[in-house]
């Protein structure tokens, strides 16, 4: 069993890291990934359940509302979840947040167990799945403290990928489970795993006293321009990932009804986006997160245009392949933007302070605390993109019969994000030249 609290934690000290820090950090990362993975599965399970609700005779727009609501609630919950590890301890809050997943799991079974369940009840119960969306913020804010600066891109990328892949696993496993045991099993199936995650976190994770912080002090990062700039960029990366992943099954069913049997392939998109996310962090550790992010946004705009072409030509193969490319680029962007956040706040904190001094070490600690708080706010704002994408598709289909209008808007937004990245983090004569020099 891990120690409940660790008071001596110096991951940026090479001797400490090699001697004991690496082992402890890896153990916490493993169980963090497990709990976060389950959070994503419950958060996005309605993406599969909605395509099985034909007997309820809901419209496509109504079904997109059911898929979108967990994204909306989960995004909002990420703000308090961000500050919870610093207030209660990373291990302690992981146990609690895992157990809270029992709520959407049980209520889903209740909703689909009654053929007379009204639409508004489906909306309320689907909204509780947002509890799973909050887990990402607490997990990422917690893991930030365990790793040294030069390893944060890869560590955060692995942690996030392990969670993100939950979208893929739910879309792969749930059709099989539902087919074998009925729709209620889409919720009940996860209960043993939820209990295992809570028990594992209790016995094998740690709380860090160095991560303790006053939420009021942490909230000060909300007044930083960098927090909001990165929030916009994260809408374009993670918001796009969760939006496109959860919309995919319903998009296939509504736009290619003759290919409805291929909904089972929808898991490939989020799987690809999740597995490639660490590559975005790895590239950013070597090339700089802003450079990778800039190029990636350009690729996202092009991929969205190709998806639009596939829909307009009613060419399923082009649509599917372009959609895979689009989700893959969201994964790379997830890794690169998350690598930028700790680098930005570290660069701002140590600006003008000589390295190797006590003042520099203190500034690094402040930068890490600020980055942890900012990660939560940025991930919360960014996750709203998942809601906007689902509502964009639903509204576009309701108004025009197709998703082309929504995709055109998304592509234009990615071009704006690329311009913001260049202006704020790469243009040496821009508004933040110190950050451009730091290769964030």
Image: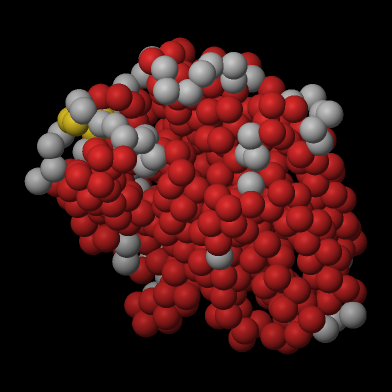
Foreground residue among 436 and 48: 436
Q: Indicate the quadrant where residue 100 lies.
A: top left
Residue 209 position in % (x across, y down): 25, 24
Foreground residue among 229 and 322: 229
**Side of 433 relative to 180 (left or right):** right
Rendered view: 369 above or below 223:
below
Position of the C terminus, as image quadrant, is: top right
Q: Residue at x 45, y 28 (%)?
A: 368
Q: Is residue 22 visible?
A: yes
Q: Residue at x 63, y 46 (%)?
A: 289
Foreground residue among 90 and 93: 90
Residue 136 position in % (x across, y down): 45, 45
Rendered view: 220 above or below 129:
above
Q: How many marks?
A: 0
Please identify the residue farthest to the left as the structure is shown.
Answer: 1
Q: How is the image coloured?
A: secondary structure
Rendered view: 429 above or below 337:
above
Residue 34 position in % (x across, y down): 32, 56
**Side of 427 relative to 244 (left or right):** right
Q: Indicate the quadrant where residue 76 lies.
A: top right
Residue 35 position in % (x across, y down): 33, 52
Q: Residue at x 64, y 47 (%)?
A: 288
Q: Is residue 48 visible?
A: no
Q: Residue at x 45, y 19 (%)?
A: 360
Foreground residue among 252 and 413: 413
**Side of 34 relative to 318 (left or right):** left
């Amino acid at each position: 069993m891990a120690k409940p609290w660790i008071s001596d934690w110096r991951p940026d000290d090479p001797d400490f890291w090699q001697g004991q820090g690496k082992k402890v950090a890896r153990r916490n990362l493993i169980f963090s990934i497990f709990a976060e993975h389950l959070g994503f599965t419950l958060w996005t399970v309605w993406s599969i359940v909605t395509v099985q609700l034909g007997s309820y005779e809901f419209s496509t727009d109504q079904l997109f509302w059911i898929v979108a609501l967990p994204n909306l609630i989960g995004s909002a919950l990420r703000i308090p979840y961000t500050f919870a590890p610093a207030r209660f301890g990373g291990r302690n809050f992981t146990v609690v947040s895992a157990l809270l997943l029992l709520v959407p799991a049980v209520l889903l079974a209740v909703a689909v167990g009654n053929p007379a369940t009204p639409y508004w009840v489906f909306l309320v119960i689907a909204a509780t799945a947002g509890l799973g969306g909050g887990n990402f913020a607490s997990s990422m804010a917690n893991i930030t403290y365990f790793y040294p600066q030069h390893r944060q891109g890869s560590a955060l990328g692995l942690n996030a990928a392990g969670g993100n892949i939950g979208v893929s696993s739910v879309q792969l496993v749930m059709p099989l489970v539902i087919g074998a045991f009925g729709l209620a099993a889409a919720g009940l199936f996860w209960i043993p795993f939820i209990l295992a995650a809570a028990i594992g976190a209790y016995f094998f994770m740690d709380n860090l006293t160095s991560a303790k912080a006053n939420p009021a002090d942490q909230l000060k990062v909300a007044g930083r321009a960098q927090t909001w700039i990165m929030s916009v960029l994260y809408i374009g990366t993670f918001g796009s990932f969760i939006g496109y992943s959860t919309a995919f099954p319903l998009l296939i069913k509504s736009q290619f009804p003759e290919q409805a049997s291929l909904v089972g392939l929808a898991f490939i998109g989020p799987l690809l986006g999740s597995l490639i996310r660490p590559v975005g962090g790895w590239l950013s550790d070597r090339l700089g997160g802003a450079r990778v992010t800039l190029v990636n946004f350009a690729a996202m705009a092009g991929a969205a245009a190709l998806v639009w072409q596939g829909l307009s030509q009613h060419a399923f193969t082009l649509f599917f392949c372009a959609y895979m490319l689009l989700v893959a680029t969201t994964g790379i962007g997830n890794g690169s933007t998350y690598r930028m956040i700790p680098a930005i706040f570290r660069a701002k904190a140590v600006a003008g302070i000589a390295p190797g001094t006590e003042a520099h070490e203190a500034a690094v600690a402040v930068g890490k605390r600020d980055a942890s708080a900012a990660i939560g706010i940025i991930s919360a704002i960014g996750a709203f993109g998942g809601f906007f994408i689902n509502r964009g598709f639903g509204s576009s289909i309701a108004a025009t019969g197709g998703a082309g209008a929504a995709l055109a808007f998304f592509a234009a937004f990615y071009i704006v994000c690329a311009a913001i990245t260049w202006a704020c983090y790469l243009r040496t004569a821009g508004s933040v030249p110190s950050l451009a020099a730091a290769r964030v």
